[in-house]
Structure formats: C-alpha cells, structure tokens
Image (cartoon, rainbow, N blue to C red):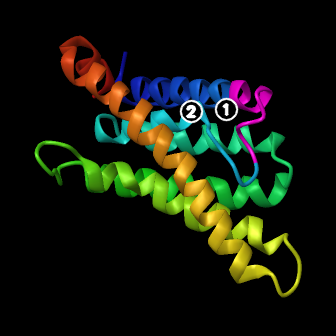
Amino acid sequence: MNKKTLYLTKAALIAALYAVLTYIAAAAGLAYGEIQFRFSEALTILPLFCPAAIPGLTVGCLVSNIMSTVNPVDMVIGTLATLLAALCTRALRNVRIKNYPLLSMLMPVIFNGVFVGAEIAYFAGEGAFWPVFASAALSVAAGEAAVVLLLGTLLRSVIERHEKLKTLLK
C-alpha cells in the first residue's frame, strides 16, 4: 500500500472511531452541551503518535457535530477547536514532564474549554456572555480533562507498551 493510501486509511479509521464513540456518548446524554464526557476525546492523544490523526480527529468531530444541538455553529467552532488542538498536540509531542506529555495532552482541554465555552455563552443571550462563558468553559474543560487525562493516558500507555501498535500508528 502506498504512503498516501495508508495515511488516508488511518485518518478515515480514526474519524469513524471518533464519530462512533461520540454517538455512544450522545446516547448517554454526555456528548453535547455544557457537561461533556465524550469518550472519543481519549483519541485526541493520537497526534502524539500519528500525523494522520490530525485530519482523522477533525473529520470525526465534524461528522459528530452534525448531531449537536447547535448543529451548524458547532460543526464550525467545535471542529476548529479540534483541529487546532490536534495541531498543537502534534507540535508539542516531544515536550515532556517526567516522560509524560502533559502540555500536549492539555491542548484539547484548553481549546475545547475556550471555543465550546464561548459557543455556549454566545447562545445564552444578551448580557450573559462572560458569566456563562466562565461557567461553560470550566465545565467543558473539566469533562475534557477527565476523559483526556484518564482514558487518554490509558490509551497512551497501551500504545507505548505495544511496538506493533506504535508501528501501525506511525
């Protein structure tokens, strides 16, 4: 298989997995709104290992946000947050604290907290932006941090312990 085909295949698989996991979280009422625990966000650590994860996560988020309660806006804002977070995660992958890529793993937490928090605040109504933003940004970031730092760390450990998996992701 040539490199371009392999890259596109990896990106497509990541996009599909992200969308499926988000829809599972949505069925449990956890994927959209101020309180979010998208299991799919554990996959945001994949740019640490795989450049194809950047378009994969971006497209997966775009597809997932079709079901959002603020659909067209979330398709743009949420997807942009995911793209920027994935790019920063990849760029910071070698910055480590005691061999842990904390800074890169915090990128989805920061970007989603700010972007989705602002999106929620925007729809809250006139005059309520800043108080709603503060609350929503913290809430979204907390849910994101729980998923990324718990499930993402677990996924990262599994990948790093299995050479075949690491090789497959490269």
Residue 145 in picture, x, y percent from top left = 47, 48
27 magenta-colored: yes
Disc sitting over residue 22 in the figure: 1
Q: In which image quadrant can residue 153 be found?
A: top left
Q: What residue is at 68 percent from the left and 71 percent from the top?
A: 118
Residue farthest along the bottom direction in this orientation: 127
Q: What residue is at 51 percent from the left and 43 percent from the top?
A: 55
Task: Compare residues 34 and 76 and report the one nearer the observer.
Answer: 34
Q: Which of the two labelled residues, at mark 2 and mark 1, occupies the earlier sequence position?
A: 1
Residue 92 in picture, x, y percent from top left = 26, 55
In the image, which residues are magenta? 23-32
Residue farthest along the left direction in this orientation: 98
Residue annotated with mark 2: 40
Q: Amino acid at mark 2?
A: Ser
Query: For numbered disc 2, what is the local secondary structure?
Result: helix
Is disc 2 in contact with disc 1, using a CB cutoff of under 8 Å? yes
Position of residue 121 in the picture relative to residue 145 (left or right) = right
Mark 1 Cα-neighbour bin, 10 Å: few <14, some 14–19, many ≥20: many
Mark 2 Cα-neighbour bin, 10 Å: few <14, some 14–19, many ≥20: many
